[in-house]
Image (tube, coloured by chain):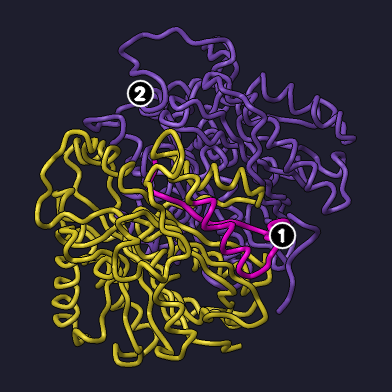
Chain colours: A purple, B yellow
Amino acid sequence: MTQHRIGDHTIEFANHPRILSSAAVVGPKEGRGPLGQAFDLALEDPLYGQKSYEQAEHAMFQEACQRCLNKAQMPRERVQALLGGDLLNQIMAASLAARELSIPFLGLYGACSTMAESLILGGILVDGGYASPVLCAAGSHYCTAERQYRFPLEYGNQRTLAAQWTVTGTGACLLGGEGDGLASLTLATIGQVVDLGIRDANNMGAAMAPAAADTLTRHFLDTGRKPQDYDQIITGDLGRVGSDLLLELMEQRGFPIRESLHTDCGLCVFDPKDDVHAGASGCGCSASVLSAMILPRLQSGEWRRVLFMATGALLSPTTSQQGETIPGVAHAVVLEGGNQG
Amino acid sequence: MTQHRIGDHTIEFANHPRILSSAAVVGPKEGRGPLGQAFDLALEDPLYGQKSYEQAEHAMFQEACQRCLNKAQMPRERVQALLGGDLLNQIMAASLAARELSIPFLGLYGACSTMAESLILGGILVDGGYASPVLCAAGSHYCTAERQYRFPLEYGNQRTLAAQWTVTGTGACLLGGEGDGLASLTLATIGQVVDLGIRDANNMGAAMAPAAADTLTRHFLDTGRKPQDYDQIITGDLGRVGSDLLLELMEQRGFPIRESLHTDCGLCVFDPKDDVHAGASGCGCSASVLSAMILPRLQSGEWRRVLFMATGALLSPTTSQQGETIPGVAHAVVLEGGNQG
C-alpha cells in the first residue's frame, strides 16, 4: 500500500487532483463588496424568490453547484460524489441540494471549516481513484444563521465589535484527476479540535485562532516548510480579531508570518462602509472567496502556491446555553497554480 | 492512477482495510434488550453522571471511542483521524469528544446513515494510504433527539405506531491497514438522496426505505451480485414499517430478498416488551449493533460476507415546519470475515 503521509498530520496528494471549475453564488451585500464582480451570481434579494431564508439557502447551494458543473461542461450524471455542508441544523441546504442534483452524497459538518474539509476528502477520493469527478461545496446564509445561532433579525439586536457577519453565499469546486485545472491540490493537513476556553458566541475569531495556529504549526513541522514557502497563507474567516491573534500565536510558536503574507477571507468579502464589525464568517465565506479570488489568482500566475486553511467554531446554541466553551478546528489544503501532475 | 471503481456508484477497497476493534456504549433500555450482554457498557442512568442529556451523549461518544482504542491497545496519539457524527445540532457530541481525544477530526452528518458514511470515508483513508489507523464512530441519545426533533420528554407525548425509538448509544470502530481484524471492508456503494414525498416525521422507516432500495439496487447492478451472494443484508434502522417496504420495493425491482436474508438493526436492539412500536433508530442504532452483533458474527465465521447499509432520514424541525418532505439516504459497505487482504 503506497503511503501518502508526511509527518503526523499531513497528507500528500501524489496525483495532484485538479480543481476543474468553481462557482460562487452570493447575496446582495456580498455583491456590493470588493469581490462583487468576481462572483458568478450576486442575488438582488436574499430570499432568492423563495418563501423562507432556509429555502433560499438551499436554492443558492444548488445553483452554485449547477453553475460549477456548467462551467466545466460536466453533466451531473457523471459526477460520482458531492461532499459538502452548511450551517443549518442537519445541514439541510446541502442535503436538499443533493436531492435535486441526484449526485451520491456525503454530508459533512465542520462549521466554517467545511470547504477545506470537503476539498481534503474530495481530493482523497480523486487522488486515490475512488471517485472522479467530485463536487465539493459549502454555504451559509446570514438570515438563517442569525436566527439559528443568535436572534431573529426582527429583534434588531445590537452586534458587538468582535462579532462577524455570516456570508450569504455558497462556493463550489469540481475536482477531477486529469485535464486543465484552475489549480491543483498537493498537500493537506487535517486539524485537531482545540479549545482555549472562549465562551463568547460573538467572538468566533478568538475561538478559532488557536485551532488555526495549531494546524498551521503542525503543517510547518510535518513538511519542513516555512511561512515564506507560500505566496500567501489564507485563513477561512478569522476576521479582524482572530487574524491578529493568529499572527501573535504564530510568532510565539517560532513561525512568524509577516502581515503581507496573510489574507483572511473574512476580511475580503464586505465593503468596510457596510459596518460588519470584525469581518465576515460562515461556511460560505471561505468557499466563495476561494472561487472568486483565490483560484483566479492561482490561475493567472499571480500566486503559485498558497495555503488555504478554513477555520470552524464548533458550537451550538444548546452547548452555549449549557455553559460549554467553544472549540475550534482548522483544516489546511495546499493549492498550486496550473497543473502540477 | 489506479481506479477503485466498479460501476457508477461502487468503490472497491483493493487493500481490504480491517476493522481492528470495535466498542459500543449504550443506555439502560438498550442494555435490557436482546443484545444487552454484547455491548461493552450499558449505562444504568441515561444521564451518565452528567448535568444534561447532551453532555451524557458527548461523554458516551467519548467513552465508546476510548474503549475501542483500548481493545486494540492503540494509544490515541497514534490515531490519524476520527470520522464521525451524531444527531445533535452541529454534531456537538462528536465534536466535543474529538476535543477531549485530541485526534484530527473530520465531522460527518448523514443522520442515521452516519456509521456507514464514516466506514466508507475512513476505509478510503486507510485503503489509499492517506491515514491509518482511523477511528469511525456514530452516536445518538433518545432524550436529546426527542426534545430536538419532536417534543421534550416531560410533555409525555403519545407516540404513533410507525414511530421509532432513538437508540441511546454510540458505536466505534478502529480501522487499520494490516494485522488481524474482526472483519475487512471490500466494497462500498455511496447513496443518492431519494425522496418519495413522505412528510410524517413519525414515520422515518417509510422515508428511508426508498433510499435503501435505491442504493441496494445500484449495488447489485454495479457488482453483478445478487442478494443471495450475501450471508445477510443488514439495514441500518428501517424498523418494522421500513423493512417491509424495502422487501416490497426490492421485489418490484427484480432483486427479491427472502425475509431470512434480511436483518434490520432497528429490530435488534429493544426487547419487544419495551413497546418501542416500529423499532429502534438513530445514528447509534446501526453503530452499536455493528459492534455488538455484526462484527462478532463475522469474526466467528457464522457470517462470511454481509452487506451493511445504514439509512438516514434527512430532516430538520425547520424543514418539516416549512412543509418540506423527508429525503432519505443510504450508504452500503461490504464486510467480510477475517482478513481478506
At a point 43% along the width and 24% down the height, the residue shown is: A321
Residue B75 inside the magenta-drawn segment: yes
Counting from the top left corner in percent of width and height, residue B226 is at 30, 90
At a point 33% along the width and 10% down the height, the residue shown is: A155
At a point 86% along the width and 34% down the height, the residue shown is: A253
> What's the chain of the residue with tag 2?
A
Near-viewer residue (B328 or A48) = B328
Quarter of the image holding residue A198?
top right
Is B6 displayed left or right of A98 in the figure?
A: right
Give the numbered dot on residue B185: none
Counting from the top left corner in percent of width and height, residue B163 is at 16, 54
SS at mark 2?
helix
Counting from the top left corner in percent of width and height, residue A211 is at 68, 37
For residue B130, say whether it is visible: no
At a point 32% along the width and 41% down the height, the residue shown is: A59
Label 1 neighbour load within 10 Å: few <14, some 14-19, many 20+? many
Label 2 neighbour load within 10 Å: few <14, some 14-19, many 20+? few
For residue A95, say whether it is visible: yes
Q: How many marks?
A: 2
Counting from the top left corner in percent of width and height, residue A13 is at 70, 63
**Type of amino acid under label 2:** Arg
The residue that label 1 is drawn on is: A11
Instruction: Please give the range of residues in magenta.
Output: B61-88
Position above or below: A151 against B69: above
Quarter of the image holding residue A326?
top right
Near-viewer residue (B6 or A49) = B6
SS at mark 1?
strand
The residue that label 2 is drawn on is: A147
